[in-house]
Amino acid sequence: MTASPVHLRRRRYFVLQIADELELNFDRFLRARREGRRFCKCSLLCPLSGNAIDIDPDDLGLAVRIPADAWVDLDEVPVTDERERSRLVDLASRGVLLSDPPAEGWAHLAAGEDALEQAPWNELAAVYHARTRWQGVDVLHPTLPVGNVRLAYQHLRWLRGEPPSPFVERDDADRVTPLRVPKLDDAFFRTLLARRTTRAYRSGEALPIDALEQVLYAVFGTHGLAQLAEGVAALKRTSPSGGALHPIEAYVLVLNVDGVGPGLYHYDTRIHALARLEAMEAADARALAGHFTSGQTFFADAHALVIHVARFRRNFWKYGRDVKAYNTVLMDAGHLSQTFYLCATHLGYGAFYTAAINDADIARRLKLDPLRESPIGINGIGIIEPGRDDLHLPAEPYHPVRMDSTAMR
C-alpha cells in the first residue's frame, strides 16, 4: 500500500531570536574555572502558542527553502541527501513547518496562521500577545508579605535595591514657570480625588442591582451610533477609543448582586442586558474569581467582576498590521477602567482594575479564540469594607512645593 504523499509549507509568522549562550566545561567549573564555549542559539517565537522553538541555524536555512504561499511535495523539495529530507519531516513534527496531513499535535497550525492573516495581526504584536498570556498563575508568592503595604515594599526594596525617585526634575531646563495650585472643590474633582483601588469588600452583603446597571451603562453602554458608510458603524461611549471602534466587550462574573444569580454573563450593549452564559453556585463563582485574578483573593471578595475582552478584528479591520494597533486596544481598556473607577466612586462603591489575570484560562472558560477575542484586564465593583483594608495605599495629602524666586529664574 502506497503511503499518502506529504506536502509542506513554511509558516508565515515567526519572530527569530538569536542569542549567544555559554556552554560551561563542568570539569573546569568544579575547579573554579568558568571558561566555556560560546555558541549561537536560534529560537523561533511562535505567535500562536507563545512558545520558543529552538532551531539549529542549518535547519533554519533548510526551512526557508520551503515556500510560504504554496504547498510543495516533500519528495520534490531539492535536497542534497535523504538526511536533509528527514530533517524537513522533523521540522514539521516540531511545528516549524506546516504539513499536509498535519504532523501529530499540530493540526491547529494552518487555521491559526489563517486567523493571523485575516485579523490581520502585526507579527510582533501577535508574538507579544501570545507570549504574555497566563494560565494557572498565582501572583501572591508565599515569600512576599502581602498583609502590610509598608512591609511588602520594604521587602521589594531589599530584593531590587533603591527605586527611582517618584519625581523627575530636568537639570537642563533653562526656565521654570510656577503655576498656581487650583482648588479642586466641585463635585467632579472631589470624585476624582476620592478615586482609589479597593481591596476589601463587604462580600456577605448583596450589591444593589441598580449599581451594576448604572456602571455598566455609564462605562460600556452605547450612547451614540454613527453610520460612517454602508455597513460601517462607529459607537459613542463615555470613554475614547481609537477610530471610535470600541473593540472592548464587557463580560461579567456576578458574585453577589441583588436579583442576579452568580455566574458568567455577557453585557449586550445593543439592548443593555446581561446574557447569561453559565450559572454557578456562589462558592464556585468566588473560587473562579480568585483564579481569574491570578490568586488575588482580595479581589475575589468583590461583588461583580467585569472582564475586558478585546475584539481584535474590530480594531484591526481599520488598523490591520499597524505597529500601534495592539497598543491602541490596550489603551482603550485603560480609558474604560478609569471611567469605571470614577463611576463606582461617584456612587459610593469600591473598585479595582488588574491586568494580572489568567487570560488564557478565562478565554477557554468564555469559549473565545485568543487570536480573535481575548481578555486583557478585569475591573471589579463592590461595597467597601472600611475596617480591614490593610492593602490600601496609605497616601497622605501632597501639595506641590513652592519655589523661591531665585529658583524660578
Image (cartoon, rainbow, N blue to C red):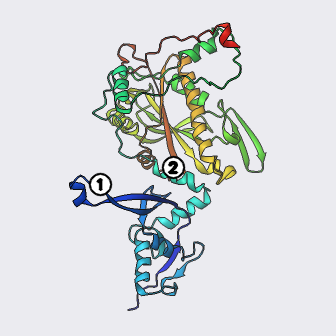
Type of residue at label 1?
A: Arg
Residue 35 x, y percent position in the rendering: 31, 57
Q: Is 317 left, or right, of 131 in this rendering?
A: right
Residue 360 x, y percent position in the rendering: 43, 48
Disc 2 crowd, CA 10 A, few/some/many (<14, 14-19, 20+): some
Q: Looking at the image, which is closer to me, 83 or 302?
A: 83
Q: Quadrant of the N terminus?
A: bottom left
Residue drawn at 38 percent across, 19 percent down: 202
Residue 275 showing in the rendered view? no
Q: Residue 180, relative to residue 249: is it above or below?
A: above
Mark 1–mark 2 Cα distance, whole angstroms, equals 37 Å
Q: Which sits earlier in the primary sequence, circle 1 or circle 2?
A: 1
Q: Looking at the image, which is closer to me, 326 or 83?
A: 83
Residue drawn at 44 percent across, 26 percent down: 257
Q: Give the number of callouts.
A: 2
Residue 279 x, y percent position in the rendering: 40, 39
Residue 180 x, y percent position in the rendering: 68, 10
Type of residue at label 2?
A: His
SS class of the residue under badge 2?
Answer: helix
Q: Which residue is mark 2?
A: 129
Q: Looking at the image, which is closer to me, 8 or 182?
A: 182
Residue drawn at 57 percent across, 56 percent down: 123
Q: Residue 202, relative to residue 125: is it above or below?
A: above
Q: Residue 243 lies in what quarter of the image?
A: top right
Q: Which residue is mark 1?
A: 34
Q: Quadrant of the C terminus?
A: top right
